[in-house]
């Protein structure tokens, strides 16, 4: 094994994994024949970026298709599309999410050691929120269930409770465990934990559970403030993100955008607090997209990390839609249209790349397969 490592100095991560992993015969078989077993080994919660993007896109289309009282609104353009288009998009999001959940469930059964390692990884653990966020977004955009029905309420509780359970684990570690202090593990993907609470708060508010909504919103916004300051000060965690995962920097403007939507549902109006959060998200959006060099290395080769671009754009477009509905100005409607078109275009491009290059979705040099993940 040591001879193999010396012969391949350009692939240290892959050789470390081969050295540490369990049965040598099993690894040799996986290298020779990319079977289902190797797919389970390389699959991880980061693939729920795809379902996040599609579910966020479905919610955006539903919101844009709703009637409005603004005479200058551009939503009628969306309503000109056949309703079957939205149903197809929602069905695609549902199929993708179910497929990813089933695959991850099989991984839990046959690769439980890898799942445990993911819980200990400073990036991987944050994506454990992603499937529950996806289900809540899909539930809010469903054309088949109405809020306040028993089935809708039960599903909302079922998808929200895991988020609270993960809150207790992760937020508790941030201030009780030395190696898991926020200053040591903070990175842009940590904002997914905040987004999970804000999506849950919005879902609860839309069903009339105001106290539950305020509870989840307070958890999300309090930890967002702490996390935002930590990332701004560039502690160790913010520098520990591999170049391939740079697209997750788009999450910087997804969190305040989701916060504005959540508070809009709680207060029943896009008030000054919502506008402040929305303007913050616009500023962060401009700050991120004006630095293309930041994403240069991650764009050299297609990977599942590219799907991190779509979801934040969809959430920002949703916030712009609510802002335009409140202020009823042509400038706001134009901003909503531009962001919505950008979100749709990015999602379509990612879908085309995924269909044309499916083999690139399971690379052998995925950052989630690094030696730190295995050692934990």
Image: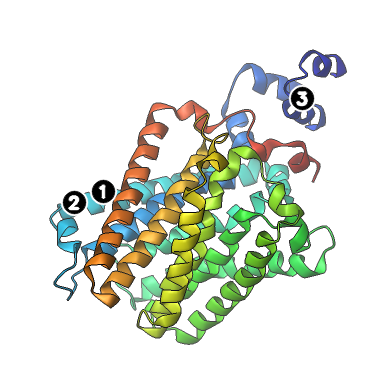
Percent position (x, y) of residue 193? 59, 63
| Residue located 77% across and 25% down the image | 15
Q: CA distance from mark 3 to mark 2?
A: 49 Å
Q: Which one is nearer the viewer's eye here, 46 or 245?
A: 245
Image point 66% across, 60% down: which residue? 231
Is residue 364 or residue 21 the one in the foreground? Answer: 364
Secondary structure of the residue carrying tag 1 is: helix
Residue 15's disc is: 3
Q: Tell whether label 2 touches label 1 (CB within 8 Å).
A: yes
Using the image, determine if residue 86 lies above or below residue 351.
Answer: below
Q: CA distance from mark 1 to mark 2?
A: 6 Å
Mark carried by residue 236: none
Residue 119 seen in the figure? no
Residue topped by disc 2: 84
Mark 2 residue element: helix
Q: Residues within 10 Å of mark 2 (few under 14, many from 20)?
A: few
Identity of the residue drawn at 37% across and 77% down: 206
In the image: residue 210, left or right of residue 40: left
**Horizontal side of residue 4 vs 229, given as left or right:** right
Asked whether disc 3 touches disc 2, contact meaning CB atoms under 8 Å apart, the reply is: no
The residue tagged 1 is: 88
Q: Earlier in the sequence, mark 1 or mark 3?
A: 3
Quarter where residue 62 is shown: bottom left
Give the left or right position of residue 246, taking residue 89 as reference: right
- Residue 83 in the image: x percent, y percent? 17, 55
Q: Secondary structure at mark 3?
A: helix
């Amino acid at each position: 094994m040591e001879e193999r490592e010396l012969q391949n100095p350009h692939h240290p991560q892959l050789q470390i994994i081969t050295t540490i992993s369990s049965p040598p015969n099993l690894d040799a078989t996986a290298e020779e024949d990319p079977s289902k077993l190797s797919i389970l080994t390389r699959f991880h919660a980061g693939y729920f970026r795809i379902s996040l993007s599609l579910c966020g896109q479905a919610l955006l289309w539903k919101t844009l298709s709703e009637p409005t009282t603004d005479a200058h609104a551009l939503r009628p353009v969306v309503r000109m599309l056949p309703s079957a288009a939205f149903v197809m998009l929602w069905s695609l999001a549902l199929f993708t999410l179910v497929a990813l959940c089933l695959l991850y469930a099989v991984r839990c059964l046959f690769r439980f050691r890898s799942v445990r390692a993911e819980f200990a990884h400073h990036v991987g653990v944050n994506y454990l929120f992603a499937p529950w966020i996806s289900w809540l977004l899909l539930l809010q955009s469903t054309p088949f269930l109405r809020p306040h029905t028993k089935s809708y309420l039960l599903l909302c509780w079922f998808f929200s409770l895991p988020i609270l359970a993960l809150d207790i684990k992760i937020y508790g570690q941030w201030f009780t465990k030395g190696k898991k202090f926020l200053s040591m593990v903070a990175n842009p993907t940590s904002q997914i934990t905040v987004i999970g609470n804000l999506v849950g708060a919005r879902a609860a508010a839309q069903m009339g559970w105001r106290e539950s909504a305020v509870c989840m919103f307070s958890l999300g916004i309090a930890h967002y403030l702490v996390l935002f300051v930590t990332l701004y000060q560039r502690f160790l965690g913010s520098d520990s993100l591999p170049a391939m995962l740079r697209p997750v920097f788009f999450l910087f403007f997804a969190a305040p955008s989701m916060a504005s939507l959540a508070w809009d549902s709680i207060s029943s109006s896009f008030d000054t607090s919502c506008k402040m959060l929305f303007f913050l998200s616009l500023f962060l959006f401009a700050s991120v997209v004006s630095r293309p060099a930041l994403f240069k290395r991650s764009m050299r080769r297609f990977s599942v990390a590219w799907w991190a671009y779509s979801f934040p754009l969809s959430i920002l477009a949703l916030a712009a839609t609510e802002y335009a509905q409140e202020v009823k100005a042509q400038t706001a409607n134009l901003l909503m249209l531009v962001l919505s078109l950008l979100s749709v275009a990015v999602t379509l491009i990612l879908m085309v790349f995924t269909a044309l290059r499916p083999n690139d979705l399971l690379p052998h040099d995925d950052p989630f397969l690094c030696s730190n993940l295995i050692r934990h």
